[in-house]
Amino acid sequence: MTFQGFDRHDFETFAIEGLDARMEAIRSRIQPKFRELGERLARELSVMSGTEMFLHIAQHARRSVNPPQDTWLAVSANKRGYKMLPHFQVGLFDDHVFVWLAFIYELPSKSEIAAKFLKQVKMIRKAVPAGFAVSTDHMQKTAVPIGEIDLERTLVRFRDVKKAELLIGRQIAAEDPLLQDGEAFTETVLKTFEVLMPLYHLAGSSR
């Protein structure tokens, strides 16, 4: 199967009440699309990064009461997991798709990566287009355009605060017609990750 894109039905998943019912909808509506998209992303990112990359699809296995507010796929250089490594994410909240290069709080080398990035703030600002965004918490919808954020301060917080995270990439509104064109969306994701690959490599030797 070829990835056909995301539609309103996918976003409506997050209005379903109850953990079991919402998880069933995530598994039936969204995860098959994640597999179609993610398998291609893993192949392309393997070539782009020069390292074999593996697809992971969030299972939300630790949840026992509250249904997930978002869901995602991740691509990382480890077959067994992704949270402890820099990784690439594509996922959905109820009102947008996110496309991130993600450094989340489980990452053991956060301080080393932050130190490298702090030395390369000018390079990062030059490499990352103004239309890209930065998030400091993968559990929240909010993100700030990179041109409006105090990047140095954000990186210091990422370094010093245990729960602080760094996610750089794009958010695409649910109503954007791009999402319904699977090939065009996939190309947009790949171009986004290509732009972010120098940051991935900059962080990489700390893995």
Image (cartoon, rainbow, N blue to C red):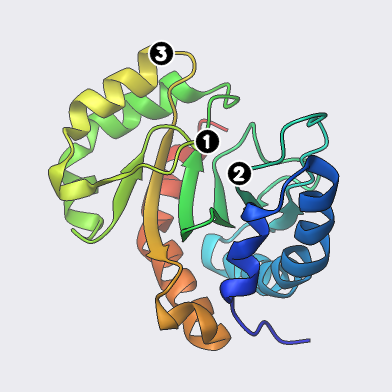
From the viewer's perspective, tell me whether residue 78 is left or right of residue 207: right
Amino acid type at mark 1? Met
* Comes first in the chain, label 2 or label 3: 2
Mark nearest the camera among 1 and 2 is: 2
The percent coordinates of residue 57 (x first, y second) are 74, 53
From the viewer's perspective, tell me whether residue 56 is left or right of residue 155: right
Which of the labelled discs sits on residue 139, or is there none?
1
**Mark 1 and mark 2 residues within 8 Å of each other at the beta carbon:** yes
Which of the labelled discs sits on residue 69, or is there none?
2
Q: Examine the rendered structure and indicate whether residue 71 appears above or below residue 1.
A: above
The percent coordinates of residue 41 (x first, y second) are 62, 69
Q: Examine the rendered structure and indicate whether residue 119 appears above or below residue 130.
A: above
For the view shown, which residue lies furthest in the front direction? 17
From the viewer's perspective, tell me whether residue 66 is left or right of residue 11: right
Secondary structure under badge 3? Answer: loop
Q: Which residue is mark 3?
A: 161
Secondary structure under badge 1? Answer: loop
Q: What residue do we see at 40% from left, 76% from top?
A: 176
